[in-house]
C-alpha cells in the first residue's frame, strides 16, 4: 500500500551519479585512491581525488562571526549579494534593461523557480536532448511538459533547425513556453553555443514573440560559466539579452557551487532581464513567494562569503585560485581530447565545463565493464559522461584508452 499522492509517487528516487559515487567510496577504501578513477561526480577534485575547497572561500567561513552564519538571510537574499551576483555574472556584458536577482539555494533553486513561475501545468519546457536530469524531474514534479529536440547536427554543432521546429510546434499547442539552454560548458557534453548560435536563438525567439498572445521565457543555466573560457569571452552572449520584447523574458540561473567550490553551501540566484520594469517587479514578488514556501531563506553564510570576496582588497585572492582551477581543468581536458584523437575515439566537441562526453548506444554495458577496472563514469542512453573535473591529468590517458578499448570491443 502506498501513501504518497499520485503526483509525488516515483518508481525511482535515487540519483544515478550519487549512487555510483557511493561505489567509488567503497572502491577507494578497498583499493586506495591511486587505483581508482572517479569520473562520475561534478565536483572538482585534486590529483589525489579529494574534493577541492578554495582557501579564499573557506577562510571566510572560518573567520565569519557566528551571528552572520546563524542568522536568517532576507528571503530574497542580502541586498549586496543580489547586486554583486548581477555584477559578477555579467561583468562587462551586462544586458541593457531592468535586471534583478533573487537568491536561491544553488542553481537548482533558480531553475525550479523559473519553471514554476513561468509555465503552467502542461506548458512545455523545451530542452536539448543531452541534459541534466533534474530539469526533467522538476517538470515532472510540477506537471510541466518536458520536451526535447536534437541538440546536435551530424557534425556536432547546435541544431538550430531542431530547436526552431520544437519551439514552433510548442507554440502551436500552447501560449506559454520556456526554452532552457545549458551553456557554456554544457552538462553532460562540454558543448558551448557560439555567439552566432546564440544570435540565431535570440533572433528566432524575437520573431516568435511578435505574436503578443505568446509568453516566452528563456531559461539559461550557466552553472559552468567560470570553467568555459578565460572568464570574459564566454560572457559576451549576455549582451544579446538587451532590449528584448516584453513577452520574451530571460532568466539566467547563477550558481556558486562550481565557481566557488561551494556545492554544499547551497547558494545561487535567479537573474531576470526585461525591458519592462513591472515584469521585473512581478518576478521579484513571485520568486520571493516561492522562496518563502519552499526553503524560506538562502544560506546566509554563503551570501556573506560572496559579499566579502568581492571587496576590492579580497577579489585578487579568489581570482588567483579560480585561474589555477581553470588551468588544472583545461590541462585535463586537453589531454583527454589529444588521447581521444590518438585512439580515434569520437567525442562531442569540448568547449568547457566539468564533463566530456563519448556518444555510444552501449553506455550501460561499457560503464559496467569500466567499473570492473575501478573506472567510474556515468552512462545514459546517448553515451558516457566523463567527469574530468575529478581525474588527475596523469590518469586521463588510462581512462581514455580503457573507454576506447571497450567501445571498440562492442
Ligand atoms: N545545472 C547544471 C547543468 C548542473 O550540472 C548543476 C549541478 O550539478 C546545477 C545546475 C546546479 O547545481 P547547484 O544547485 O549545486 O548550483
Image (spheres, grey):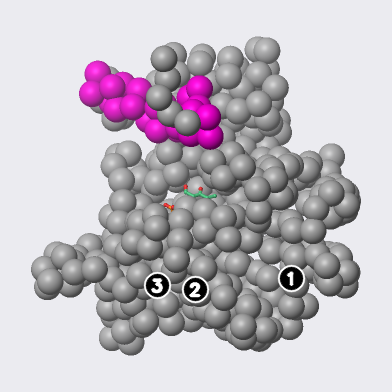
Q: Which residue is mark 1?
A: 248
Label 3 beta carbon less than 8 Å to ligand 1:
no
Q: State whether residue 275 is above or below residue 184.
A: below
The answer to whether residue 289 is seen in the rendering is yes
The answer to whether residue 196 is seen in the rendering is no
Q: Nearer the viewer, residue 77 or 304?
A: 77
Q: Residue at x 88, y 52 (%)?
A: 172
Q: Which residue is mark 2?
A: 285
Q: Quadrant of the N terminus?
A: top left
Find the magenta span and give its range. 6-30
Q: Residue at x 88, y 69 (%)?
A: 211
Q: Nearer the viewer, residue 180 or 276?
A: 276
Q: List x then y, in percent, for residue 11.
A: 50, 22
Q: Which mark is residue 27?
A: none
Query: Element type at marker 2?
Result: helix
Real-space CA distance between mark 3 and mark 1, rounded to the nearest whole angstrom: 23 Å
Real-space CA distance between mark 1 and mark 2, rounded to the nearest whole angstrom: 19 Å
Q: List x then y, in percent, for residue 363.
A: 61, 22
Q: List x then y, in percent, for residue 60.
A: 20, 69
Q: Of marks 2 and 3, which one's residue comes earlier in the chain?
A: 3
Q: Which residue is mark 3?
A: 76
Q: Residues within 10 Å of mark 1 (few under 14, many from 20)?
A: many
Amino acid at each position: 500500500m502506498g501513501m504518497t499522492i499520485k503526483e509525488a509517487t516515483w518508481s525511482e528516487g535515487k540519483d544515478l551519479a550519487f549512487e555510483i559515487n557511493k561505489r567509488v567510496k567503497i572502491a577507494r577504501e578497498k583499493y586506495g585512491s591511486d587505483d581508482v578513477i572517479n569520473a562520475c561526480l561534478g565536483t572538482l577534485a585534486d590529483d589525489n581525488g579529494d574534493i577541492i575547497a578554495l582557501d579564499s572561500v573557506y577562510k571566510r567561513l572560518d573567520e565569519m562571526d557566528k551571528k552572520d552564519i546563524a542568522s536568517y538571510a532576507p528571503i530574497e537574499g542580502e541586498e549586496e549579494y543580489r547586486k554583486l551576483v548581477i555584477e559578477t555574472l555579467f561583468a562587462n556584458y551586462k544586458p541593457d534593461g531592468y535586471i534583478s536577482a533573487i537568491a536561491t539555494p544553488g542553481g537548482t533553486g533558480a531553475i525550479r523557480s523559473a519553471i514554476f513561475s513561468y509555465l503552467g501545468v502542461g506548458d512545455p519546457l523545451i530542452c536539448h536532448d543531452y541534459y541534466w536530469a533534474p530539469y526533467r524531474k522538476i517538470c515532472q514534479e510540477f506537471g510541466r511538459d518536458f520536451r526535447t529536440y536534437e541538440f546536435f547536427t551530424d557534425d556536432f554543432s547546435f541544431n538550430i533547425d531542431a530547436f526552431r521546429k520544437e519551439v514552433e510546434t510548442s507554440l502551436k499547442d500552447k501560449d506559454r513556453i520556456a526554452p532552457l539552454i545549458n551553456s557554456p560548458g554544457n552538462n553532460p557534453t562540454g558543448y558551448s553555443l557560439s555567439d552566432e548560435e546564440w544570435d540565431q536563438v535570440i533572433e528566432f525567439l524575437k520573431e516568435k514573440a511578435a505574436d503578443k498572445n505568446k509568453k516566452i521565457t528563456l531559461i539559461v543555466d550557466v552553472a559552468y560559466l567560470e570553467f568555459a573560457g578565460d572568464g570574459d569571452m564566454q560572457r559576451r552572449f549576455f549582451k544579446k539579452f538587451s532590449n528584448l520584447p516584453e513577452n520574451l523574458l530571460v532568466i539566467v540561473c547563477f550558481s556558486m557551487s562550481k565557481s566557488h567550490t561551494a556545492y554544499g553551501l547551497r547558494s545561487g540566484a535567479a537573474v531576470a532581464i526585461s525591458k519592462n520594469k513591472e515584469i521585473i517587479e512581478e518576478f521579484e514578488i513571485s520568486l520571493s513567494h516561492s522562496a518563502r514556501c519552499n526553503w524560506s531563506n538562502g544560506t546566509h553564510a554563503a551570501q556573506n562569503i560572496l559579499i566579502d570576496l568581492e571587496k576590492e582588497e579580497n577579489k585578487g585572492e579568489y581570482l588567483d585560485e579560480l585561474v589555477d582551477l581553470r588551468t588544472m581543468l583545461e590541462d585535463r581536458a586537453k589531454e583527454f581530447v589529444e588521447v581521444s584523437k590518438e585512439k580515434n575515439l569520437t567525442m562531442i566537441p569540448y568547449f568547457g565545463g566539468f564533463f566530456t562526453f563519448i556518444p555510444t548506444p552501449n553506455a550501460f554495458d561499457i560503464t559496467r565493464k569500466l567499473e570492473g577496472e575501478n573506472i567510474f563514469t556515468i552512462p545514459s542512453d546517448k553515451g558516457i559522461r566523463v567527469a574530468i573535473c575529478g581525474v588527475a591529468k596523469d590518469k586521463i590517458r588510462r581512462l581514455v584508452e580503457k573507454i576506447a578499448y571497450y567501445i571498440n570491443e562492442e
